């Protein structure tokens, strides 16, 4: 049995500010309250919360700070138009994570390798009180007003930065092509002083290649699928996957129907769980190793259980993906690498040792 899992992308704070979804509340209660509501219509049936992390043995979650640009917002409220607005809302989300850890004994913020190992130890000790570690990651760097602010964000617990969601002042992003800007290059220089994780999910392709050349620290794509399964600039071409692997990076596969079948939004046909295993296997076969692929669910990131593959009703069901991989001959070493080991390697490289 796989002892625990790591999920490299969940928009926990955004769900609280946008929809008042409390991560300490069991999703059954939340679903009952949201049934037929505008929240359910917009975001789908909820999939993540502390009880489900614990039930699914999810030991670490990359918890994002995410604010939606107002220019692309539909019905969203937690948005920004200026760097000051992005900064203010981003700091609100950071404070939310800090307060969550303060009031929930089973939640711990991960700022160092000591924090990481302490959390993982609780999953290796039968009688320990299980804890879920939150690694704070910024999705879309506009909340950082100037590159010089990186040190302050780092001192407050930020450990990973994604340059873009859509276009930002730092880089082109999904559906908004563009390069790494001068501000983006300056941001990478500031990040390198702390060896922060650079997350290239959502980076436009031009910015992706430029960032690979410009940044010498650890690089990931926390929640991106192969373009062979979803042929848009939101995902990684085989060439990009190879380049990420050459930097010993890791990409997290997203179990979202629209990211697994090009025409799913039109057909809304059920997607078998095997399709997630297909995406993982594509990366493994392309690279000849399971060392560079893992999971980044993006659950509750604008979609819910109705848009997830069959068998994934919540984050508690994450092991079912690995059951499919077992039937395909994946051994336990490979399964453990994909479930948590590859992300642990990246975190041990990026986190300070105190």
Image (cartoon, rainbow, N blue to C red):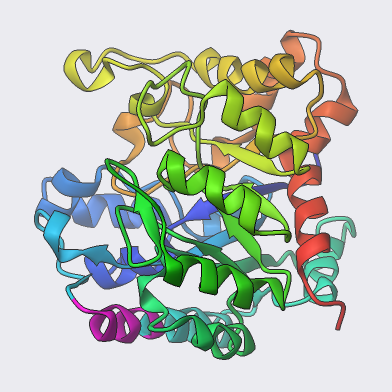
Image position, residue 289 (x, y; %):
81, 24
Q: State yes or no: residue 59 in magenta.
A: no
Q: Residue at x 73, y 9 (%)?
A: 327
Image position, residue 87 (x, y; %):
34, 83
Q: Quadrant of residue 259?
A: top left
Out of 100 and 221, give the one closest to the viewer.
221
Q: Which residues are magenta?
A: 82-91
Q: Is residue 54 above or below residue 188?
A: above
Q: Residue at x 38, y 83 (%)?
A: 145
Q: Is residue 109 above or below residue 123?
A: below
Q: Is residue 284 above or below residue 249?
A: above
Out of 84 and 97, give the one closest to the viewer.
84
Residue 277 in sight in this render: yes
Q: Quadrant of residue 165?
A: bottom left
The majority secondary structure of the magenta stretch comes to: helix
Specify the quadrant that holds the C terminus. Answer: bottom right
Taking the view exactly as shown, the residue that stands out farthest to the front is: 182
């Amino acid at each position: 049995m796989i002892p625990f899992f790591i999920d490299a992308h969940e928009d926990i704070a955004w769900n609280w500010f946008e929809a008042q979804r409390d991560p300490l509340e069991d999703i059954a209660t939340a679903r009952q309250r949201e049934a037929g509501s505008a929240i359910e219509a917009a975001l789908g049936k909820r999939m993540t919360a502390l009880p489900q992390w614990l039930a699914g043995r999810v030991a670490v979650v990359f918890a994002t700070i995410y604010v939606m640009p107002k220019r692309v917002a539909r019905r969203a409220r937690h948005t920004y138009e200026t760097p000051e607005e992005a900064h203010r809302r981003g700091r609100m989300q950071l404070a939310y994570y800090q307060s969550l850890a303060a009031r929930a004994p089973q939640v711990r913020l991960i700022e160092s390798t000591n924090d990481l190992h302490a959390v993982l130890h609780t999953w290796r000790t039968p009688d320990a009180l299980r804890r879920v570690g939150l690694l704070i990651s910024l999705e879309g760097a506009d909340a950082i007003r100037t590159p010089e602010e990186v040190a302050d964000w780092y001192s407050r617990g930020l450990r990973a930065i994604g340059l873009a969601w859509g276009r930002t002042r730092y880089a082109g992003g999904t559906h908004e092509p563009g390069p790494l800007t001068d501000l983006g290059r300056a941001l990478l220089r500031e990040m390198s002083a702390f060896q922060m994780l650079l997350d290239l999910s959502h980076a436009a392709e031009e910015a992706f290649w430029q960032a690979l050349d410009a940044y010498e620290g650890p690089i990931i794509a926390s929640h991106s699928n192969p373009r062979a399964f979803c042929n848009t600039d939101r995902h990684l071409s085989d060439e990009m996957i190879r380049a990420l692997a050459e930097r010993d990076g890791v990409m997290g596969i997203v179990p979202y129907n629209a990211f697994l079948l090009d025409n799913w939004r039109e057909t809304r046909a059920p997607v078998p769980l095997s399709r997630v295993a297909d995406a993982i296997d594509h990366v493994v076969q392309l690279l000849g190793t399971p060392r560079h692929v893992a999971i980044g669910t993006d659950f509750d990131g604008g979609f819910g259980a109705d848009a997830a593959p069959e068998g994934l009703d919540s984050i508690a069901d994450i092991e079912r993906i690995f059951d499919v991989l077992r039937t395909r001959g994946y051994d336990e070493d490979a399964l453990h690498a994909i479930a948590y080991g590859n992300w642990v390697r990246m975190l041990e490289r990026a986190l300070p040792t105190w």
